[in-house]
Image: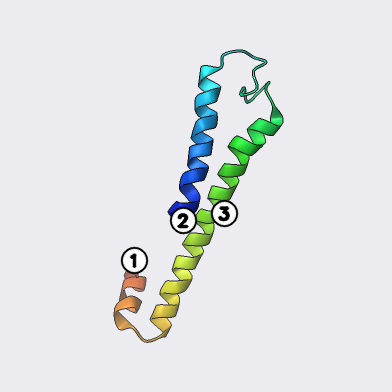
Protein backbone atom coordinates (compact mmCIF):
# COMPACT_ATOMS: atom_id res chain seq x y z
CA UNK A 1 0.00 0.00 0.00
CA UNK A 2 2.71 2.48 0.96
CA UNK A 3 4.81 1.86 -2.15
CA UNK A 4 1.77 2.20 -4.41
CA UNK A 5 1.18 5.70 -3.06
CA UNK A 6 4.80 6.72 -2.57
CA UNK A 7 6.36 5.85 -5.92
CA UNK A 8 4.23 8.19 -8.08
CA UNK A 9 4.71 11.04 -5.61
CA UNK A 10 8.46 10.51 -5.54
CA UNK A 11 8.42 10.50 -9.37
CA UNK A 12 6.61 13.87 -9.43
CA UNK A 13 9.05 15.33 -6.90
CA UNK A 14 12.02 14.00 -8.87
CA UNK A 15 10.62 15.41 -12.13
CA UNK A 16 10.38 18.83 -10.49
CA UNK A 17 13.98 18.57 -9.32
CA UNK A 18 15.18 17.58 -12.79
CA UNK A 19 13.25 20.41 -14.45
CA UNK A 20 14.67 22.81 -11.91
CA UNK A 21 18.26 21.74 -12.65
CA UNK A 22 17.97 22.05 -16.43
CA UNK A 23 16.40 25.51 -16.29
CA UNK A 24 19.03 28.06 -15.28
CA UNK A 25 17.05 31.28 -15.76
CA UNK A 26 15.89 33.18 -12.69
CA UNK A 27 12.46 33.81 -14.17
CA UNK A 28 11.89 30.20 -15.22
CA UNK A 29 8.72 28.46 -14.10
CA UNK A 30 10.67 25.72 -12.35
CA UNK A 31 12.90 27.99 -10.26
CA UNK A 32 11.87 27.42 -6.61
CA UNK A 33 12.78 30.95 -5.50
CA UNK A 34 11.63 33.18 -8.34
CA UNK A 35 9.46 30.86 -10.43
CA UNK A 36 5.83 29.84 -10.19
CA UNK A 37 4.57 29.35 -6.64
CA UNK A 38 1.81 27.07 -7.93
CA UNK A 39 4.29 24.78 -9.70
CA UNK A 40 6.47 24.65 -6.58
CA UNK A 41 3.48 23.88 -4.36
CA UNK A 42 1.96 21.20 -6.59
CA UNK A 43 5.17 19.47 -7.63
CA UNK A 44 7.39 19.88 -4.57
CA UNK A 45 5.52 20.66 -1.36
CA UNK A 46 2.34 18.63 -1.83
CA UNK A 47 4.12 15.34 -2.65
CA UNK A 48 6.47 15.82 0.31
CA UNK A 49 3.61 16.39 2.75
CA UNK A 50 1.56 13.50 1.37
CA UNK A 51 4.58 11.19 1.66
CA UNK A 52 5.09 12.34 5.22
CA UNK A 53 1.48 11.56 6.10
CA UNK A 54 1.65 8.14 4.39
CA UNK A 55 4.82 7.26 6.29
CA UNK A 56 3.32 8.37 9.59
CA UNK A 57 0.12 6.42 8.93
CA UNK A 58 2.04 3.28 8.00
CA UNK A 59 4.23 3.56 11.09
CA UNK A 60 1.32 3.95 13.48
CA UNK A 61 -0.72 1.29 11.68
CA UNK A 62 2.17 -1.16 12.02
CA UNK A 63 2.55 -0.49 15.74
CA UNK A 64 -1.20 -0.85 16.20
CA UNK A 65 -1.32 -4.18 14.33
CA UNK A 66 1.63 -5.53 16.35
CA UNK A 67 -0.09 -4.62 19.60
CA UNK A 68 -3.32 -6.26 18.41
CA UNK A 69 -1.46 -9.46 17.57
CA UNK A 70 0.17 -9.40 21.01
CA UNK A 71 -3.25 -8.95 22.68
CA UNK A 72 -4.72 -11.91 20.83
CA UNK A 73 -2.35 -14.18 22.68
CA UNK A 74 0.19 -14.80 19.95
CA UNK A 75 3.22 -15.21 22.19
CA UNK A 76 5.64 -15.06 19.26
CA UNK A 77 4.21 -11.69 18.16
CA UNK A 78 4.35 -10.42 21.74
CA UNK A 79 7.99 -11.45 22.07
CA UNK A 80 8.90 -9.76 18.78
CA UNK A 81 7.08 -6.60 19.83
CA UNK A 82 9.01 -6.43 23.11
CA UNK A 83 12.33 -7.08 21.38
CA UNK A 84 11.51 -4.54 18.66
CA UNK A 85 11.42 -6.89 15.72
CA UNK A 86 8.80 -6.95 12.98
CA UNK A 87 5.51 -8.69 13.74
Q: Is residue 11 above or below residue 85?
A: above
Determine which quarter of the picture holds residue 39.
top right
Residue beneath disc 2: 2
In the image shown, does 63 or 29 lie closer to the viewer?
A: 29
Q: Position of residue 82 (x, y in %)?
A: 35, 72
Q: Is residue 43 above or below residue 36?
A: below
Residue beneath disc 3: 53
In the image shown, does 19 or 78 lie closer to the viewer?
A: 19
Residues marked 1 and 3 touching at CB (< 8 Å): no
Horizontal side, residue 9 vs residue 74: left or right:
right
Q: Position of residue 3 (x, y in %)?
A: 43, 52
- The residue positioned 46% from the left and 56% from the top of the image is 2
In the image shown, does 57 or 71 lie closer to the viewer?
A: 57
> Element at badge 2?
helix
- Mark earlier in primary sequence (1, 3): 3
Q: CA distance from mark 2 to mark 3?
A: 11 Å
Residue beneath disc 1: 86
- The residue positioned 49% from the left and 33% from the top of the image is 14
Q: Nearer the viewer, mark 1 or mark 3?
A: 3
The colour scheme applied to this rendered structure is rainbow
> Element at badge 1?
loop
- The residue positioned 44% from the left and 73% from the top of the image is 65
Amino acid sequence: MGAAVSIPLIAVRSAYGILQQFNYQLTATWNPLFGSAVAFTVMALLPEYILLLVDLWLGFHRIKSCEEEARKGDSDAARKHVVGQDC
